[in-house]
Image (cartoon, coloured by chain):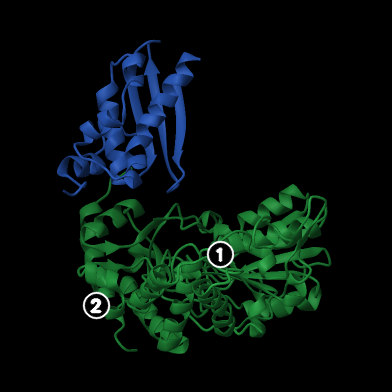
Chain colours: A green, B blue
């Protein structure tokens, strides 16, 4: 892959920074910042219904992003792309707009223990509020979902039933880094209950690998702009048109209506029905630039680059620390993106992250919005290093060298 | 300046008052929700002052050092004086300043001690 580091101004501002927190948010290339700046400086008017040139330009740039995002995830129509604030809001849009209509007492909502809270708490609360059963698919010690029979085939009997209204699945875990066999799981769900609506959380997948909603055969897919070189403040919900066409709105107000009278309000078509109020116009335009930037690099190329770097990260950590390190999900045989969440014997993740910061290395410590998974794998908290297209082999070597120093300073720890 | 000063590393590696008092008058557990750390604080008292105090649990260097220094500091102190201890006092004991992200670690032991006193006064 070509060297992209010059594309990212933050890496020029902080020349010594080793940024290993891309799973939290990615750095932004200059062309994304330029696109947003151009909106504000050249045509920063509100979109829709402004019958003058710069408003029309803003509308057309904003609407064009729908097509660009639709093409990027192979959605059949740009009308199926809804802009939200973030992936969390994308999930909540479904639980509020559809969930409240569809879930009755005794129904089931299924998710997994490896989810980010964004794809866990909204479903849990929906189930609790409607007296539905909240079923959580367990995982094994290596983090793989506990869905396989003795022959290694996916077996969801006993999990999915005729009462399963929704199933929420992550495509890539933000802690394990593993790419889940979501396409095969969806096939197994559909074989038992074709009416189950399936939402895929692709916030950690879309930035790192090619994602195709038609190939996955899901009903909804949530993604986040700021993890894929785009700005914060923008998320996307993709949904099948035949479902969105009948889905009631969730937020009411401006921009989502057709006609408002004192007695009655009628709503606009999807996706506008779901975008009440003035959206983050600059952000959406920035997302378009981000997608085009990633397409320029090539998602297949990026995925390969990350798989190679990710493997190097795991190998170097394991070689350096042997049994003193426990990397969550490292024993899985699933393909993975470039990240490692780990426990280092005798070293508290907060201290590890703070001491790495003294070496100019940015990592994250905590449970990464995945408390059920940490509890399941009996890890209090982990330190997570996550990579992206601008990460180099040198970054990883420096991380491992710095970790050695950190380990020496923190250990021998107190003997309790 | 690194927050991992010698005094902090010493208290982290060799914490004072580590363990649990055998017959405490107060025994509380407190959890830092941001990292899952928990500290148990045990206290004996004569009703108005701290006679002895101990702590145990899993914590980072900052929270362990803070607990070690703080438990030394409050022995023999009146409940009123302990209750008046603030963020500033803890940071003075540690001899560092902290970013908001780490302040919670440093303040966890004080929160535990305050809670222990509250149970004694009920």
Residue B61 visible in the shown view: yes
Q: Position of residue A65 (x, y in %)?
A: 54, 77
The chain under label 2 reads: A
Tags 1 and 2 touching, CB below 8 Å: no
Marks 1 and 2: which is nearer the front? Answer: 1
Q: Secondary structure at mark 2?
A: helix
Disc sitting over residue A45 in the figure: none
Identify the mark nearer the N-term, 1 or 2: 1
Q: Is residue A199 left or right of residue A351?
A: right
Distance between the alpha carbons at the discs numbered 1 and 2: 32 Å
Residue position for label 1 = A87
**Closer-to-camera residue (A51/A332):** A51
Q: Is residue A45 above or below residue B6?
A: below
**Closer-to-camera residue (A153/A340):** A340
Asked whether the residues under marks 1 and 2 belong to the same chain, the reply is yes
Q: Report the quarter where the N terminus of chain A lies.
A: bottom left
Q: Is residue B33 above or below residue A67?
A: above
Quadrant of the image occupied by residue A198: bottom right
Q: Secondary structure at mark 1?
A: helix
Q: Position of residue A4 (x, y in %)?
A: 31, 82
Residue position for label 2 = A394
Which residue is painted at 57% across and 66% down in the image? A140
């Amino acid at each position: 892959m070509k060297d992209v580091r010059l594309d990212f101004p933050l890496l020029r501002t902080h020349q010594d920074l080793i940024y290993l927190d891309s799973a939290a948010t990615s750095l932004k290339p200059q062309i994304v910042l330029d696109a947003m700046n151009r909106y504000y400086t050249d045509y920063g008017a509100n979109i829709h219904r402004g019958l003058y040139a710069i408003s029309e330009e803003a509308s057309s740039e904003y609407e064009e992003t729908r097509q660009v995002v639709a093409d990027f995830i192979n959605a059949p129509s740009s009308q199926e792309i809804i802009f939200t604030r973030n992936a969390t809001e994308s999930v909540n849009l479904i639980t509020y707009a559809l969930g409240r209509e569809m879930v009755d007492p005794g129904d089931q909502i299924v998710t997994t223990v490896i989810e980010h809270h964004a794809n866990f708490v909204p479903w849990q609360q929906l189930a609790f509020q409607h007296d539905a059963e909240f079923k959580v698919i367990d995982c094994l010690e290596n983090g793989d979902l506990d869905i396989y029979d003795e022959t290694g085939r996916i077996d969801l009997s006993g999990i999915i039933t005729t009462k399963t209204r929704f199933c929420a699945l992550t495509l890539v875990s933000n802690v394990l880094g593993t790419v889940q066999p979501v396409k095969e799981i969806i096939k197994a769900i559909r074989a038992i209950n074709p009416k189950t609506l399936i939402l895929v959380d692709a916030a950690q997948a879309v930035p790192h690998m090619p994602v195709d909603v038609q190939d996955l055969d899901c009903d909804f897919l949530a993604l986040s702009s700021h993890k894929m070189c785009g700005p914060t403040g923008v998320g996307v919900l993709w949904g099948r048109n035949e479902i969105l066409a009948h889905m009631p709105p969730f937020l009411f107000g401006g921009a989502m209506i057709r006609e408002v009278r004192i007695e009655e309000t009628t709503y606009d078509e999807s996706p506008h029905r779901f975008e009440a109020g003035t959206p983050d116009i600059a952000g959406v335009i920035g997302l378009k630039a981000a997608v085009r930037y990633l397409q320029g690099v090539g998602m297949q190329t990026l995925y390969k680059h990350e798989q190679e770097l990710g493997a190097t990260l795991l190998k170097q950590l394991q070689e350096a620390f042997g049994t003193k390190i426990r990397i969550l999900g490292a024993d899985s045989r699933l393909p993975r993106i470039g990240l490692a969440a780990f426990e280092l014997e005798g070293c508290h993740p907060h201290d590890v992250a703070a001491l790495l910061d003294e070496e100019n290395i940015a990592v994250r410590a905590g449970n990464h919005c995945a408390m059920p998974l940490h509890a399941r794998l009996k890890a209090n908290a982990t330190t997570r290093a996550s990579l992206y297209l601008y990460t180099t082999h040198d970054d990883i070597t420096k991380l491992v060298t710095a970790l050695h120093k950190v380990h020496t300073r923190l250990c021998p720890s107190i003997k309790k | 300046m690194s927050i991992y000063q010698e005094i902090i590393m010493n208290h982290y590696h060799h914490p004072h008052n580590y363990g649990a008092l055998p017959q405490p008058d107060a025994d509380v557990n407190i959890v830092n929700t941001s990292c899952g750390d928990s500290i148990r604080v045990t206290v004996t008292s004569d009703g108005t002052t701290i006679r002895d105090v101990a702590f145990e649990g899993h914590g980072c260097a900052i929270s362990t050092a803070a607990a070690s220094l703080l438990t030394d500091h409050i022995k023999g102190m009146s409940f009123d004086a302990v209750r008046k201890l603030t963020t500033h006092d803890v940071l003075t004991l540690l001899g560092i300043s902290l970013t908001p992200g780490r302040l919670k670690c440093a303040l966890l032991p004080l929160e535990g001690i305050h809670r222990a006193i509250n149970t004694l006064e009920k």
